[in-house]
Image (spheres, rainbow, N blue to C red):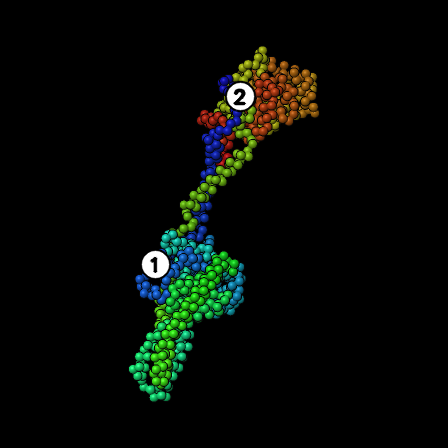
């Protein structure tokens, strides 16, 4: 045991190593808080999942046509030369994604499905949207501008088979109206229409009308479109919504509106071409009618029924030359019209007619590219501002292509003009032959030549008009629907397992953080380890917290953990006092502490009781003259004591001694009255006389002294001590205050000093300690029965 005490007194140096088990035990001792946190977390997760609106995911798959990756269908190959599909133009899937999510497309979807108006039905806990299941619908005949400026919410109550009440959201009555009655209000003109397909029996419906722009922004952010693969033109469009059928309807409508918009874009070029041809046909038809009338009149006036063989030969040669002239002049007229269109556009950009029979392939391609850029710009203008980088880039490309197109057309015009001049020179040779024909026949030939030219141009335009009509007829949607919108019945949010795990983690994390912070900020002494890490003072033992309210916890039959602790301290005292030589005199054991409230009196009385049980003569002496605690602790009236002995020569020690029935064989001398000058009294010779007398009469003298940090009284009488018990109270004394005890030990101001840790909590489970719980098995009865919940959370 002596070796054990010596080992305990050795200073345990701090090091950087971490005892994992010790750290874990700091948290395991509070296991009940973790269990409580887990239970609360799981209940909270259940309630969250019970009353949180689930979210469902719906998706649809489409393939973008007119794309290099998707190719052109065989059915449309026959129309490729008409310029209605393919022809070097392709859709960029990334651009089509932006078009799908554009405000224009989403706005059309909102209008088509009337998404600005929502209907809600109140439940016992939460309010749920009734999409297509609301018992009533709002049918607007004419909307007021207020609906475009701010959100509006009101309540419709069914008060009969065909009567309704309108109320504000606060419940104030607005009006009573009948079913299908046109109502004139601040919102505009509308009617209440009954939904015959509704199975809802609720009488109260909350109607929420939102501003269209807000609804568009909401769904633009919620709709997600992605390419399935980098080398694919297949898009997957998805939407998460609390109502699965609503998400499906929205996705299907997005694809439908996208196709409508794409068809309109494709048809725009054909319509522009058709308008141009119709305009030209009306003018040429008038010229053709005029020349036909001129031929008829010429024949009637000159009584000519036909031509001679020479005239027919000359006319045949002229016709061949005319075909070439018609072709060149027609193409020349087309490019001149295109040049005029480019000049008239100036700052604005409009699409150009195409498929007009221009011979230069580069110009045809340039016109297609120009129209494609103009269509892309027109789409982007809907959502983008003037300074949008993409819009600026498109405008720059359009301007550059327009300039290049002008140059190309000018070069083609110059080339066609030269070709026409050459054809005219060849016409001169034909005219020479015609000049040899009689004048009457020559006149009819000239008129016929002009008629042939106009009729050829008219036929050419009629053919192009038919091609353009076919182009309009075979315009196909831009997106091929692979899978219609479908949503699973399994909610994608909230995910039950993740929610339970997250709540459980938080439920365990909160007590963990709380305990960690408490331990981190805790500077109090809790265990033997705290003392050994802060001081070199020998550790004598620790006293667990008493489970009863008894002042004296040790007796012959006591088997509590506190009683066993005092027996262990009594045994250790023998080893601490082995080397003291008192020449047969009693051994004085002084009890002190750093500050008041650490249990000096409790330790002194019970240690004296433990020594008296070993058949020793024991005296308990109260020497804390400033704050006497012995009589107060025992609950007996204040009586004469040490102060009276020092100040009164006529009082003997026998007059001061008293005993209590709880501890047989123990004599007690209290401190007496509180003097005005306790320090001076302790310096008198009477104190020396006091200890000389009692050491002769007793085996052990337990002296209850004053705290060393508050007054010097204890230091004044320390020379009379054989040993000092320095009391430190667990969960009470600050670790930093141990420097006082360490200083006194190093400077040897308190002889033979040892530390006793009082009021320890043996259930904390970390640091050193002794499991005194075995004492309960030997007849110890807890006199204070605690409720189960106090036992768990104590």
Q: Is residue 331 visible?
A: no
The mark total stands at: 2
Q: Nearest to the eye among marks 2 and 1: give it.
A: 1
Q: Nearer the viewer, residue 736 or 385?
A: 385
Residue 46, position in %: x, y?
43, 47
SS of the residue under disc 1: loop
Outermost residue to the left:
309
- On the image, numbered disc 2 is attached to which residue? 9
Q: Nearer the viewer, residue 252 or 131?
A: 252
Q: Nearer the viewer, residue 55 or 627?
A: 55
Q: Is residue 389 above or below residue 341?
A: above
The crowd level at tag 2 (other Cα within 10 Å; few <14, some 14-19, many 20+) is some
Q: Which residue sits at x=47%, y=37%?
A: 32
The crowd level at tag 1 (other Cα within 10 Å; few <14, some 14-19, many 20+) is few
Q: Nearer the viewer, residue 34 or 247?
A: 247
Q: Is residue 112 above or below residue 45?
A: below
Residue 208, position in %: x, y?
49, 60
Q: Is residue 411 visible?
A: yes
The answer to which of marks 2 and 1 sits earlier in the sequence is 2
Q: Which residue sits at x=37%, y=76%?
A: 427
SS of the residue under disc 2: helix
Q: Quadrant of residue 232?
A: bottom left
Q: CA distance from mark 2 to mark 1?
A: 91 Å
Residue 536, position in %: x, y?
55, 22
Residue 622 in the figure: left or right of residue 284? right
- On the image, numbered disc 1 is attached to which residue? 71
**Image marks 2 and 1: residues in contact by CB distance under 8 Å:** no
- Name the mark on residue 616: none
Q: Which residue sits at x=46%, y=46%?
A: 44
Residue 373, position in %: x, y?
44, 61
């Amino acid at each position: 045991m002596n070796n054990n005490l010596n080992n305990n007194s050795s200073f345990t140096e701090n090091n950087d190593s971490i005892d994992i088990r010790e750290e874990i035990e700091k948290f395991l001792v509070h296991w009940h808080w973790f269990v409580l946190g887990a239970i609360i977390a799981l209940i909270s997760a259940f309630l969250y999942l019970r009353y949180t609106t689930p979210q469902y995911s719906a998706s649809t798959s489409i393939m973008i046509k007119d794309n290099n990756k998707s190719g052109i269908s065989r059915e449309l190959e026959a129309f490729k030369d008409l310029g209605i599909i393919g022809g070097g133009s392709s859709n960029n899937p990334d651009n089509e994604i932006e078009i799908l999510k554009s405000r224009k497309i989403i706005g059309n979807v909102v209008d088509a499905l009337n998404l600005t108006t929502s209907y809600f039905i109140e439940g016992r806990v939460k309010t749920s949207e009734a999409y297509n299941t609301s018992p009533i619908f709002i049918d607007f005949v004419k909307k007021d501008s207020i609906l475009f400026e701010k959100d509006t919410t009101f309540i419709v109550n069914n008060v009969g088979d065909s009567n309704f009440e309108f109320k504000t959201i606060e419940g104030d009555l607005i009006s009573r109206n009948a079913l299908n009655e046109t109502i004139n209000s601040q919102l505009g003109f509308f009617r209440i229409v009954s939904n015959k397909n509704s199975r809802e029996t609720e009488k109260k419906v909350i109607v929420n009308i939102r501003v269209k722009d807000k609804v568009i922004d909401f769904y633009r952010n919620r709709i997600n479109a992605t390419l399935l693969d980098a080398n694919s033109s297949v898009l997957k469009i998805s939407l998460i919504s609390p109502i699965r059928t609503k998400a499906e309807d929205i996705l299907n409508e997005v694809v439908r509106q996208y196709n409508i918009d794409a068809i309109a874009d494709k048809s725009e070029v054909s319509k522009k071409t058709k308008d141009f041809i119709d305009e030209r046909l009306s003018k040429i038809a008038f010229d053709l009618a005029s020349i036909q009338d001129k031929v008829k009149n010429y024949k009637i006036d000159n009584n000519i029924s036909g031509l001679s063989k020479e005239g027919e030969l000359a006319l045949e040669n002229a016709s061949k030359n005319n075909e070439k002239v018609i072709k060149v002049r027609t193409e020349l007229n087309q490019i001149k019209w295109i040049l005029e269109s480019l000049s008239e556009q100036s700052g604005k950009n409009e699409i150009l007619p195409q498929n007009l029979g221009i011979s230069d392939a580069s110009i045809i391609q340039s016109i297609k590219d120009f129209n494609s850029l103009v269509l892309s710009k027109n789409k982007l203008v809907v959502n983008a501002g003037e300074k949008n980088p993409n819009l600026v880039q498109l405008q720059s490309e359009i301007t550059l292509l327009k300039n290049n197109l002008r140059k190309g057309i000018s070069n083609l015009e110059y080339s066609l003009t030269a070709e026409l001049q050459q054809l005219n020179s060849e016409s001169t040779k034909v005219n020479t032959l015609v000049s040899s024909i009689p004048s009457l026949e020559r006149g009819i030939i000239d008129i016929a030549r002009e008629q042939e030219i106009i009729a050829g141009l008219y036929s050419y335009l009629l053919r192009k008009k038919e091609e353009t009509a076919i182009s309009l007829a075979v315009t196909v949607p831009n997106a091929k629907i692979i899978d219609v919108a479908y949503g699973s019945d399994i909610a994608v949010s909230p995910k039950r397992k993740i929610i339970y795990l997250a709540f459980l983690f938080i439920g365990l994390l909160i007590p963990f953080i709380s305990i960690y912070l408490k331990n981190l900020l805790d500077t109090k002494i809790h265990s033997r380890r705290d003392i050994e890490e802060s001081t070199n003072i020998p550790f004598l033992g620790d006293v667990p917290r008493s489970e009863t309210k008894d002042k004296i916890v040790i007796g012959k039959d006591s088997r509590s953990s506190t009683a066993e602790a005092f027996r262990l301290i009594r045994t250790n005292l023998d080893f601490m006092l082995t080397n003291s030589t008192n020449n047969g005199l009693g051994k004085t054991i002084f009890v002190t502490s750093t500050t008041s409230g650490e249990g000096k009196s409790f330790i002194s009385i019970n240690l004296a009781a433990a020594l008296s049980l070993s058949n020793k003569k024991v005296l308990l002496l109260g020497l804390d003259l400033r704050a006497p605690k012995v009589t107060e602790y025992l609950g007996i009236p204040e009586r004469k004591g040490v102060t009276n002995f020092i100040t009164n020569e006529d009082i003997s020690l026998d007059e001061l001694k008293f005993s209590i029935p709880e501890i047989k064989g123990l004599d007690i001398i209290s401190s007496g009255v509180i003097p005005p000058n306790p320090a001076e009294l302790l310096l008198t010779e009477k104190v020396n006389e006091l200890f000389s007398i009692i050491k002769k009469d007793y085996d052990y003298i337990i002296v209850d002294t004053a705290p060393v940090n508050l007054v010097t009284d204890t230091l004044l009488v320390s020379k009379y001590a054989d040993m000092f018990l320095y009391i430190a109270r667990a969960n009470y004394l600050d670790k930093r205050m141990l420097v006082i005890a360490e200083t006194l030990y190093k400077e040897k101001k308190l002889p033979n000093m040892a530390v006793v840790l009082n009021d320890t909590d043996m259930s904390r489970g970390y640091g050193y300690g002794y499991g005194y719980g075995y004492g309960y098995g030997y007849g110890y009865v807890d006199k204070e029965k605690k409720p189960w919940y106090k036992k768990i959370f104590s």
